[in-house]
Amino acid sequence: TATTDEPLELTLHWQFEDEFREGVALVVHWADEGGAVRHSAVQPLPELPAGEAWRSGEPLTVRLRLVPPPEVPPGAYRLHLLVHQPEAGRYVGLRRGLPIPMQRSLRLGAVRLACAADGDARAHCH
């Protein structure tokens, strides 16, 4: 459970199966209980120097700090991770472990968002 004024801290450990030279961005969807995406947070991975690439099998740790979006009312949400290549206009296939088939997104987990106890400016919390 998190409050509307409390950021969520996520640490992701992963590896690319292919080599990527162009920009890659992490996208986290906030989906409500009905499955509708209520918000998308985008965080680009650090830019690589010219000629460098995210290499296949290279371990990568990314820390995400997700601030609950102001337009999202209190309630239960599922967080889904997507990896987007904006220049190529496509999403990278993802999976947990080797035998599992590739998917467009991975479920990161669920969070229950509650109004902040010490006063909350959101219209949904009055």
Image (cartoon, rainbow, N blue to C red):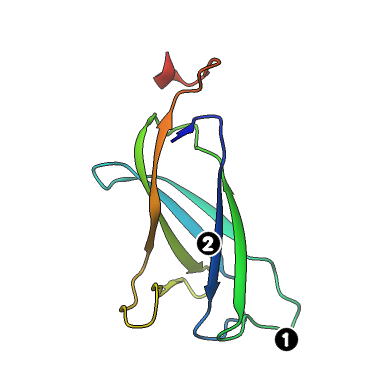
Left-right relation of 112 to 9: left
The amino acid beneath tag 1 is Gly
The residue lying at 38 percent from left, 63 percent from top is 106
Q: Which residue is mark 2?
A: 26
Q: Position of residue 31 (x, y in %)?
A: 34, 46
Q: Position of residue 38 (x, y in %)?
A: 37, 42
The amino acid beneath tag 2 is Leu
Q: Which residue is mark 1?
A: 51
How many numbered marks have been drawn onto this rendered protein structure? Answer: 2
Q: Position of residue 77 (x, y in %)?
A: 36, 42
Q: Of the numbered discs in the image, which one, if any, rests on residue 65?
A: none
Tell me which numbered mark, 1 or 2, is placed earlier along the sequence. 2
Tell me whether circle 1 and circle 2 mark residues in contact (CB < 8 Å): no
Tell me the quarter of the picture where residue 51 sits. Answer: bottom right
Label 2 Cα neighbours within 10 Å, binned few <14 / some 14-19 / many ≥20: some
Q: Nearer the viewer, residue 114 or 44?
A: 114
Label 1 and label 2: CA atoms lie apart by: 22 Å
Tell me the quarter of the picture where residue 32 sits. Answer: top left
